[in-house]
Amino acid sequence: MKIIMLGAPGAGKGTQAKLIAEKYGLPHVSTGDIFRANIKNGTELGKEAKKYMDAGALVPDELTVKILLDRVAQKDCEGGYVLDGFPRTIPQAQVLEDALAKLGESIDYAINVEVPDEAIVNRMSGRRACVSCGATYHIVNIPPKKEGICDVCGSELILRDDDKPETVRKRLEVYHEQTQPLVDFYQNKGVLREVDGTKTMEEIFDSIAKILG
Ligand code: AMP
């Protein structure tokens, strides 16, 4: 099963993507995580991506498409995957469609997690991410057991540069301009499913599980 998660930054699609990956035994493929791992390891790709990420902009399609296609060509993706944060532009979606069509495959579901902008800005300022393993928390909704410390690896939790309010507003603008058109794109392909992202994490996941069966 090949699933795409759609939704504004901070809509909770990453959390849902992880839950889906766990329940259905699929790899969770996040382009944001791949970029952050490259930044942490000081690679050329990481240095290039960081310039855009810190500004709340999208990393150019040429760079992004290549890392995504390499990732989904790996063996663990043979039985499908959950894409989180890709595609984010129509050209990215088109490249993915074309690559899959060559293999006689296609996306099964594009799940749009809907949340109004105001709710997103409030949420994102409460987000915390582990400096070391990338695990994410929320000071109100998903707090770590010990304040400021990662449950998974014990490292420090921080507010990511791209979760700061001024960057969030920029990211929402970019989302409406470049990513929202994907909702129509997948609707036209008949694979779009919508869920209410203002509900609790469990309720949202229940709706998704009903869709996926
Ligand atoms: P995320 O963790 O998915 O919110 O991604 C964090 C940042 O990484 C985004 O704000 C973009 O700068 C960059 N990024 C992640 N995925 C993509 C993508 N598919 N296309 C372009 N930029 C991306």
Image: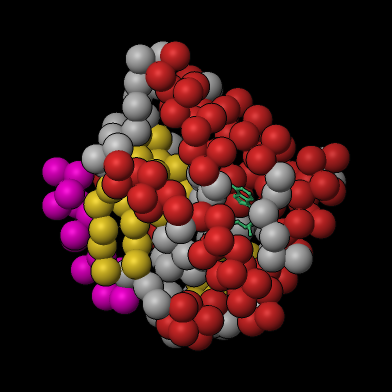
Which residue is located at x 35 percent, y 15 percent? 104
Majority secondary structure in the magenta region: helix
User: Percent x, y for residue 70?
Assistant: 60, 26
Can you see residue 49? yes
Q: Is residue 17 left or right of residue 68?
A: left
Instruction: Count every numbered label the image shows and give the total.
Output: 0
Check the image and report above or below for 34 versus 207: above
Which residue is located at x 37 percent, y 53 percent? 183
Asked if residue 195 lies in the magenta stretch, the reply is no
Check the image and tell me how it is coloured: secondary structure
Check the image and report above or below for 126 versus 104: below
Can you see residue 157? no
Where's the C terminus, which quadrant? top left
User: Percent x, y for residue 193?
Assistant: 25, 52
Looking at the rendering, the stretch of residues picked out in magenta corresponds to 198-213
User: Percent x, y for residue 58?
Assistant: 67, 54
Asked if residue 209 lies in the magenta stretch, the reply is yes
Which residue is located at x 49 percent, y 22 percent? 99
Q: Nearer the viewer, residue 82 or 187?
A: 187
Q: Is residue 179 left or right of residue 41?
A: left
Where's the N terminus, which quadrant? top left
Which residue is located at x 59 percent, y 45 percent? 31
Q: Quadrant of residue 147?
A: bottom right
User: Percent x, y for residue 75?
Assistant: 48, 20
